[in-house]
C-alpha cells in the first residue's frame, strides 16, 4: 500500500498546480491551445496555423474558414515541429519549427501571458554557412477573420473606413490586384490602407456591430525593413490583418540590396502583440488600442523574453544635427542602420530612426549593441549625411553630433522642400485614393518667381510636357551649372527626357518600379536622386526646362521631392 501513496500525492499536487495556473496549455495529437482569463488560442501542430480565437461569447473570432499563418513566396510552415520553449504559472512560450526548401529555418513562437488581452508573436529566422546562398524574401504573418464580426479598418486616426464583402467587390469591375470598382461606383483597394510605418505602432480591424477589435501592436520597428519612408500593408477586406516581418512592397525593383544570405545568419523578428478587445464602440476600441500601444512601447524590450538573439541590455544615442555653421537643424531624420547598402534596401539586420526637434536634438533608446552607420537627411538638403562606426554598448548612453554635409553650390532656384516626400505639392495632403493620379494634367507651365508651390502636382503621371520657365539673373558663362532632381517615387518604369531650351540634357529612364503611384501612395515610394551637368552655352536670358514624359503606363510616373538648379562653387 505504501508503494502507491507517493505517486498519488505527486499527481495530486501536479494537478493543483495546473488548475491554479493563470495560463494554461492543452494538447492533443494534432492541436495545442493556450489560454488565459481573457481568451483562448488553438493551433494546428502540423501547419503552425492559428485556427481559432475564443473570446468573450465568441467561439471563434476567425470563423469557419479563417486562420492566422506565416508564409512567404512558395513556402508555408508545413510541416512544423511543435515544442514548448518555456512554461510557468504566468507565461507559456510555444514554438513551431520549419525548414524551407530555400535553406532558411523558421522558428515561429507564440507567447501567452496572464495579464495580457492577446498573444505575442515572434519569429527567429536563420541560415547556415553550410547551405547555399539564398534570397531572404518577403515574410508575412497574416490573420483572416470572420467577416460577420469584423467590417472596419483601423490604421491611423486619419486612415479608417468600412470593409466590403467579397461578393460586393467581385460583383463590380476589377481594376487591378485587390482593386475593385463596385456597382455603387465606390472604388475599393487594399492599398488605400497601406501606410508608412513612421510614427505608427498599431493597426487593426473592428466590428461596427460586434464592437470587437483585433490589432497588431508593434512596440518597436527595429526588425522591420525599409526605415521611415517604408510603406507596409496593414489590413484589408475579407477581413485580413497583416504583420510583415520582411516586406518588399513599395521597394524599387532596381534597388541594390543585402538580401542574399550566404553565411551564418540569425534574425529575431518581433515580438508583436496580437491584441483582442471589446468596448462600447469602434472609436473606443481604437482609443483603448492606442493606449495599450503606449504601454507596450514602455515595456520594450520585453523582460519576459529570454533569448540570446534578443538582448535586454541595450544602448542609447543622444543625437544632434547641425549645419556647417554649427546651427542646430530641425526635423532632420536620423537613421541608424548597417553600412554598405542604401538603408532603404537593407533587410537582414536591424534599423532605428528618429527626427530632430526644434532644438536639433533627438534620442534613440533601446538599441541593440553593435556597430552601425548613422545616416541623416532633410532640412532641405539633397546630400545625405553619414557617420560610420557608431558603436553601441549595452547600458551606455552616447552623444553623437552629425554635421549635414556642405553642399558646395549656390541655389539658383528650387521647387519643393527636400525631405524625400512630395509635401507641399498639390494633392500631397490628400488621403490615399486609387485613381487620384488620373486628375493630374498632361501639361504644366511653372514660372519661377511667379507660380506657387501648389501649382506643382505630387506626381507627373501622363504623357505630356511639364515646363519650368526661369530668367537668367546672375549666371555667367564661367559658371558650372547643375540640375538635381530628387525623386520621391517612381512607378512602372516611365520614360522621361529632360530638355533645356529645346536641347536634351539627360533623361529619367530605366529607374524601375516601386509600385507607389498605382498603389495609392501620395507622399512617396523609393527615393532616388539624379544629377545633370548643364552646358553653360545652353543658358539664355529666358529659359525653359522641360520634363517631357514620353512613355508611361496608367498609374505610373514620377513623384518629385525637389528640383533644384545650382551654381557649383
Image (cartoon, rainbow, N blue to C red):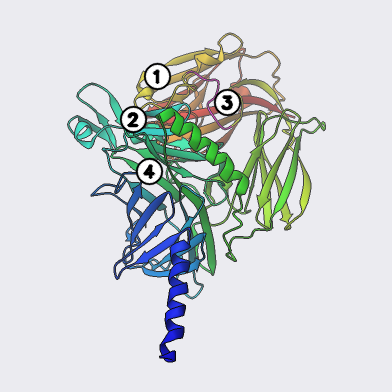
Alpha carbon separation for disc pair 3 and 4 = 38 Å
Q: Are marks 2 and 4 in contact (CB under 8 Å)?
A: no
**Badge 1 or badge 3: first in the primary sequence:** 1
Task: Choose mark 2 or mark 4, whichever is in front.
Answer: 2
Q: Are marks 2 and 1 in contact (CB under 8 Å)?
A: no
Task: Choose mark 4 or mark 1, whichever is in front.
Answer: 4
**Badge 4 or badge 1: first in the primary sequence:** 4
Q: Are marks 4 and 1 in contact (CB under 8 Å)?
A: no
Q: Secondary structure at mark 2?
A: loop
**Badge 3 or badge 4: first in the primary sequence:** 4
What residue is disc 3 on?
563
Q: Residue furthest top?
A: 450
Which label belongs to residue 208? 2
**Badge 2 or badge 4: first in the primary sequence:** 2
In this rendering, the count of numbered labels is 4
What residue is disc 1 on?
440
| Residue 384 percent across, percent down from the top left | 66, 39
The residue under the point 48% across, 34% down is: 489
The residue under the point 48% across, 28% down is: 157
Q: Residue furthest right?
A: 326
What residue is disc 4 on?
241
Alpha carbon separation for disc pair 3 and 2 = 46 Å
The residue under the point 17% across, 31% down is: 171
What is the crowding at mark 2: few (fewer than 14 residues within 10 Å), some, or many (at least 20)?
some
What is the crowding at mark 4: few (fewer than 14 residues within 10 Å), some, or many (at least 20)?
many
In this rendered view, identify the residue nearer to me: 140 or 2. 2
Q: Residue furthest left?
A: 171
Q: Secondary structure at mark 3?
A: strand
Which residues make up the magenta segment?
Answer: 420-426
Task: Choose mark 2 or mark 1, whichever is in front.
Answer: 2
Amino acid at each position: 500500500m505504501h508503494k502507491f501513496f507517493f505517486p498519488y500525492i505527486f499527481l495530486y499536487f501536479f494537478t493543483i498546480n495546473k488548475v491554479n495556473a493563470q495560463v494554461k496549455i492543452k494538447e492533443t495529437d494534432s492541436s495545442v491551445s493556450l489560454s488565459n482569463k481573457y481568451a483562448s488560442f488553438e493551433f494546428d501542430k502540423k501547419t503552425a496555423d492559428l485556427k481559432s480565437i475564443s473570446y468573450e461569447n465568441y467561439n471563434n473570432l476567425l470563423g469557419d474558414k479563417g486562420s492566422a499563418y506565416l508564409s512567404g513566396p512558395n513556402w508555408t510552415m508545413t510541416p512544423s515541429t511543435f515544442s514548448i520553449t518555456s512554461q510557468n504559472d504566468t507565461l507559456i512560450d510555444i514554438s513551431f519549427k520549419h525548414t524551407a526548401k530555400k535553406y532558411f529555418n523558421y522558428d515561429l513562437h507564440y507567447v501567452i501571458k496572464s495579464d495580457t488581452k492577446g498573444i505575442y508573436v515572434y519569429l527567429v529566422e536563420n541560415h547556415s554557412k553550410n547551405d547555399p546562398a539564398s534570397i531572404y524574401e518577403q515574410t508575412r504573418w497574416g490573420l483572416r477573420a470572420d467577416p460577420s464580426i469584423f467590417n472596419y479598418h483601423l490604421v491611423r486616426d486619419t486612415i479608417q473606413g468600412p470593409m466590403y464583402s467579397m461578393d460586393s467587390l467581385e460583383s463590380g469591375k476589377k481594376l487591378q490586384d485587390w482593386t475593385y470598382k463596385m456597382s455603387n461606383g465606390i472604388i475599393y483597394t487594399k492599398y488605400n490602407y497601406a501606410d508608412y510605418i513612421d510614427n505608427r505602432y498599431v493597426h487593426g480591424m473592428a466590428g461596427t456591430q460586434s464592437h470587437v477589435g483585433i490589432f497588431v501592436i508593434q512596440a518597436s520597428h527595429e526588425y522591420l525593413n525599409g526605415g521611415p519612408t517604408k510603406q507596409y500593408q496593414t489590413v484589408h477586406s475579407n477581413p485580413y490583418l497583416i504583420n510583415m516581418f520582411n516586406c518588399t512592397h513599395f521597394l524599387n525593383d532596381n534597388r541594390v540590396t543585402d538580401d542574399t544570405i550566404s553565411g551564418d545568419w540569425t534574425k529575431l523578428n518581433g515580438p508583436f502583440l496580437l491584441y483582442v478587445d471589446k468596448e462600447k464602440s469602434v472609436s473606443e476600441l481604437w482609443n483603448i488600442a492606442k493606449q495599450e500601444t503606449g504601454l507596450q512601447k514602455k515595456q520594450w524590450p520585453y523582460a519576459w523574453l529570454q533569448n540570446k538573439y534578443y538582448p535586454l541590455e541595450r544602448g542609447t544615442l543622444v543625437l544632434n544635427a547641425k549645419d556647417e555653421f554649427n546651427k542646430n537643424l530641425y526635423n532632420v531624420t536620423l537613421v541608424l542602420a548597417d553600412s554598405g547598402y542604401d538603408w532603404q534596401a537593407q533587410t537582414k539586420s536591424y534599423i532605428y530612426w528618429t527626427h530632430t526637434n526644434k532644438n536639433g536634438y533627438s534620442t534613440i533608446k533601446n538599441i541593440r549593441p553593435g556597430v552601425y552607420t548613422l545616416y541623416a537627411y532633410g532640412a532641405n538638403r539633397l546630400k545625405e549625411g553619414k557617420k560610420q562606426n557608431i558603436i553601441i554598448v549595452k547600458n551606455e548612453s552616447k552623444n553623437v553630433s552629425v554635421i549635414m554635409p556642405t553642399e558646395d553650390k549656390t541655389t539658383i532656384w528650387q521647387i519643393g522642400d527636400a525631405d524625400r516626400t512630395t509635401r507641399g505639392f498639390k494633392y500631397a495632403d490628400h488621403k490615399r485614393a486609387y485613381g487620384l493620379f488620373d486628375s493630374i494634367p498632361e501639361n504644366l507651365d511653372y514660372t519661377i518667381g511667379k507660380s506657387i508651390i501648389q501649382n506643382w502636382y505630387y506626381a507627373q503621371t501622363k504623357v505630356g510636357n511639364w515646363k519650368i520657365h526661369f530668367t537668367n539673373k546672375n549666371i555667367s558663362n564661367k559658371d558650372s551649372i547643375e540640375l538635381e532632381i530628387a525623386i520621391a517615387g517612381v512607378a512602372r518604369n516611365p520614360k522621361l527626357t529632360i530638355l533645356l531650351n529645346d536641347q536634351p540634357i539627360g533623361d529619367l529612364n530605366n529607374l524601375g518600379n516601386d509600385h507607389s503611384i498605382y498603389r495609392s501612395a501620395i507622399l512617396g515610394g523609393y527615393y532616388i536622386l539624379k544629377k545633370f551637368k548643364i552646358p553653360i552655352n545652353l543658358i539664355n536670358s529666358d529659359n525653359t526646362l522641360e520634363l517631357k514624359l514620353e512613355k508611361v503606363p496608367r498609374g505610373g510616373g514620377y513623384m518629385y521631392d525637389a528640383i533644384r538648379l545650382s551654381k557649383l562653387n
